Image: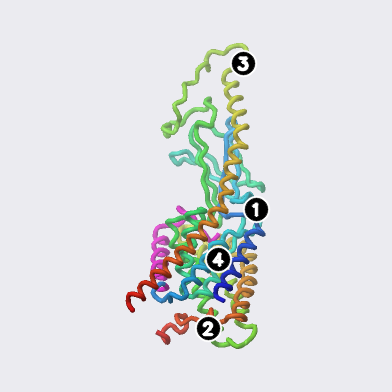
Amino acid sequence: MAHIPDGVLSGPVLAVGAAVTLAGCAYALKRLEPERIPQVSILSAVFFVASLVHVPVGPSSVHLILNGLTGVALGWAAFPAILVALLLQAVLFGFGGVVVLGVNVMTMAVPAVLCGLLFETVRRRWGHHPRIPALAAGVCGALGVLLTALAVALSLAFSGAEFRPAATLIVVSHLPVMIVEAVFTAAAIGLVLRVKPGILDRSDGLVAAGAVK
Amino acid sequence: MRRRFGSILILAALALTLGTVPALAHKMKVFATAEGTTISGYAYFNGGNRAAGVRVAVADPAGTPVFSGTTDEGGAFRFEATRRTDHVISVAGDDGHAATFVVTAAELPERLPGAEAGSAALPASPPPVGSLSRPAAVDPDDLRAMIEQGVARQIRPLREQIESYQDKIWWHDVLGGIGYIVGLGGLAYGLTQRRTGVAR
């Protein structure tokens, strides 16, 4: 359950989430090139719609998150993209509270940025290999969900819940989502790498952050 | 090409969305009504899947616990109300889902004792007339209970219809949300263009 509703988390967790989200968005917006804004808003729309796709799992139901894909495609810009999408989901659908928005953005955008970092590192080393970058994207798709699940469990744990049962429940129920997202992300990024790899080249890239500017 | 990349993604996401209707949305909800003194209801996810095995906690407006338990495989629960007061029903899964629903005092039969503390929630109901005088034909208390049960039974499908109607608005919200995102993107792009234009 990636969207935490209002009234579940404790004050300090909310504050940390808001601070991390604010800092991440400010940093991302500062580095965002205007030409990439359309790409960011498209990925934001994809992310927005993805959470409405539901997979019934046992007693509960889980939905796609696609933060791995967002991170691989956007890097740091995943922060504003996810913020906008989550805000709209909260306002329009009541997915996640408005007060906990900061925490929800943090638990999804931080894994996204980490996935972006991982993908870029792999691409830098094995960029010319026909398979490895797409495979890495698939791994990122699953990793994004896994890290988000753990981050949600941690947020709940810091608010008084037991970490282990919450983490086990969330991770296990998200296993199908991880598989679906791994396949989806690998397919989407694989396609992009074949037809137009330039989209994924970023002068504001994570790895080259210091070198380029 | 960037546009193509995006439209492929959106099409794929939309295809997935369409493929999984009616499992539309993800928010947990709880619905309950009173029939006589029995309050029954169920926890479910937007889109209709029932939430089995989630914790149910019921409290009065003052926060005193009245009932606690878990939902069965069909996501349902039921318990007997002992006082005529608002019942705040909250359900919570271990994974952070939560929802609340209030069964108001007005839904419960008047023969139950009222709330001692939170009686502000009680509607201005007439005092139970006729509870002392008992005509031979029908006990007014029984009659009242029967009427209340009958009305509750007839209203129930209506209320369920309203709940399901909320899910229908869903598509409008999806399109509206995408519109917002596109608009925000355009606005951001326009602002940056203007900034560079001024700088030039």
Distance from Cα at disc 4 to Cα at disc 2: 24 Å
Q: CA distance from mark 1 to mark 4?
A: 19 Å
Magenta span includes A184: no
Mark 4 closeness class: few <14, some 14–19, many ≥20 residues within 10 Å: many
User: Which quadrant of the figure contains the C terminus of chain A?
Assistant: bottom left
Q: Amino acid at mark 4?
A: Val
Residue position for label 1: B22
| 4 and 2 marks on the same chain | yes
Q: Nearer the viewer, residue B182 or A169?
A: B182
Q: In the rendered structure, which amino acid carries the disc numbered 1?
A: Pro
For mark 1, does the 10 Å Cα neighbourhood hold few (<14), some (14 to 19), or many (20 or more) residues? some
Residue A89 vs residue B81, the one in the foreground: A89
What residue is pinned by disc 4?
Answer: A46
Instruction: Read off the residue under disc 2.
Output: A121
The secondary element bearing badge 2 is classed as: helix
How far is the residue under mark 3 from the one under mark 2?
A: 82 Å
The x, y position of residue B75, in whole percent, is 63, 47
Left/right placement of residue A178 relative to residue A74 reads right
Separation of residues labelled 3 and 1 (CA atoms): 48 Å
Q: Residue at x 53, y 75 (%)?
A: A73
Which residue is painted at 40% across and 58% down in the image?
A11
Chain under disc 1: B
In front: label 3 or label 2? 2
Label 1 and label 4 in one chain? no
Q: Which residue is mark 3?
A: B138
Magenta span covers which residues?
Answer: A1-28
